[in-house]
Image (tube, rainbow, N blue to C red):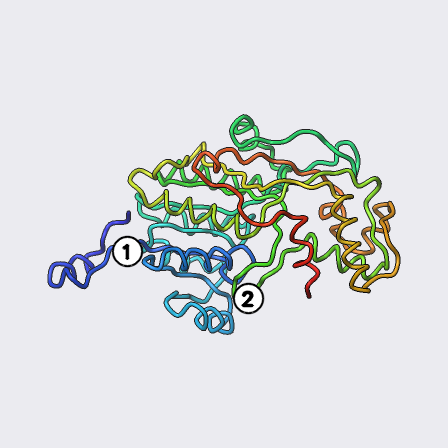
């Protein structure tokens, strides 16, 4: 827990009944998909926490205030160094959920925490994606956050997110501050945040199928991705905050072992695409059933990130977070299809 400021100690000395040592949490990305869900869950489960957040605009500030009147927000972005430093200096835990590749924000936030503070960074499992057997093809390797820890935390910098991931862990060690990196794979489900409620992979696939008039896979579509429901992911972040606030960081791993894959199953892309197309047929959104194989050139006409969205394999095993007692409780990715198509 952070140390009280001089002003707080003076208040406590004169009126101890009104002083509270409630934990203070600062969250970036609260207007986003994942950050919005975390804000929803942490304020609901822990109304005793003092939650602060970063928003980019006055409009977002008003939106957040309308639903969370007790949440204090500041306007800025991840390049607003002085704002970030000032916020981090007065809180117990920072959740950086806005951007997985923003180095300067890490260098503003993490060193500004008191030595008893904790920094938690949201990354992404794209660092281990592969198409080594070709786009749309299965690769059997599943990465563990325990057995493969040394490798995944020392990837060369050609891997997505590797630079920032390693910066978080090295800067935490340098500053003597607890740090962890949370690494979700494909996130799905409708979020309960106030601003952004949907992800990318499956909604963008629905849009592409509408545009094309028929379902598709990249080549055979046997590629497999791990997935996590946004509410299960948020529960993992809340759990880590709870552990961070315990003496010595609780039972969680921090620093060099503070690497958490968070997943709740996986899917074969061809199977998922087929089920989505069936649902779209029932709604009358398309007329042709089934999926057919297409090449990357056609896929990129549908979306410039097509190979990353629908053609790669990305498999992880979140053992470390399960060791803390977390488990995925929300509906499976296949069960979420009616909700995906509800709009």
Q: Which residue is mark 1?
A: 22
Residue drawn where x is 41% and y is 59% of the image: 44
- Establish if 340 lies above or below 267: below
As displayed, is residue 332 above or below residue 59? above
Left or right for 121, reference 247: right
Residue 142 horizontal side relative to residue 34, left or right = right
Residue 308 placement (x, y as % from top left):
72, 46
Q: How many marks?
A: 2
Find disc 2 in the rendering and name its residue: 195
Write the residue at 42% across / 44% down.
240
Q: Is residue 111 left or right of residue 286?
A: left
- CA gap between label 2 and label 1 equals 27 Å
Task: Please provide percent x and percent y for residue 75.
Answer: 45, 67
Along the viewing direction, whichever of 298 and 190 lies nearer the viewer:
190
Whether residue 138 sits left or right of residue 247 in the image: it is: right
Residue most extreme to the top: 147
Precedes in sequence: disc 2 or disc 1? 1
Mark 2 crowd level (few <14, some 14–19, many ≥20, 10 Å Cα): some
The answer to whether 142 is drawn above or below residue 33 in the figure is above
Q: Residue at x 33, y 55 (%)?
A: 24
Whole-percent x, y for residue 278 in the image: 79, 54
């Amino acid at each position: 827990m952070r140390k009280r400021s001089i002003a707080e100690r003076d208040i406590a000395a004169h009126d101890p009944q009104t002083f509270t040592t409630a934990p203070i949490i600062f969250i970036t990305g609260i207007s986003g998909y994942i950050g919005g869900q975390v804000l929803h869950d942490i304020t609901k489960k822990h109304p005793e926490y003092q939650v602060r957040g970063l928003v980019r605009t006055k409009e977002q500030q008003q939106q957040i205030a309308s639903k969370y009147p007790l949440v204090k927000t500041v306007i800025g972005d991840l390049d607003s160094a002085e704002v970030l430093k000032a916020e981090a200096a007065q809180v117990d835990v920072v959740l950086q959920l806005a951007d997985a590749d923003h180095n300067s924000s890490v260098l503003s936030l993490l060193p500004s925490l008191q030595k008893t503070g904790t920094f938690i960074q949201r990354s992404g499992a794209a660092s281990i994606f592969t198409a080594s057997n070709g786009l749309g093809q299965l690769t059997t390797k599943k990465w563990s956050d325990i057995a493969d820890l040394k490798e995944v935390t020392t990837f060369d910098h050609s891997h997505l997110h590797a630079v920032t991931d390693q910066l978080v862990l090295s800067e935490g060690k340098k500053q003597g501050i607890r740090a962890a990196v949370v690494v979700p794979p494909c996130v799905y489900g409708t979020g309960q945040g106030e601003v952004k409620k949907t992800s990318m992979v499956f909604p963008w696939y629905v849009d592409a199928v509408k545009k094309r008039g028929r379902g598709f896979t990249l080549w055979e579509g046997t590629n497999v991705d791990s997935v996590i429901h946004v509410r299960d992911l948020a529960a993992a972040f809340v759990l880590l905050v709870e552990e961070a606030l315990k003496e010595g960081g609780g039972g969680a791993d921090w620093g060099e072992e503070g690497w958490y894959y968070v997943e709740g199953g996986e899917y074969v892309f061809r199977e998922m695409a087929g089920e989505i197309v069936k649902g779209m047929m029932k709604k009358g959104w398309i007329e042709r059933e089934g999926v057919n194989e297409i090449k990357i050139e056609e896929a990129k006409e549908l979306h410039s990130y097509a190979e990353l969205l629908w053609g790669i394999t990305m498999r992880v095993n979140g053992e470390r977070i399960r060791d803390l007692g977390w488990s995925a409780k929300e509906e499976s990715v296949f069960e979420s299809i009616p909700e995906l198509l509800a709009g």
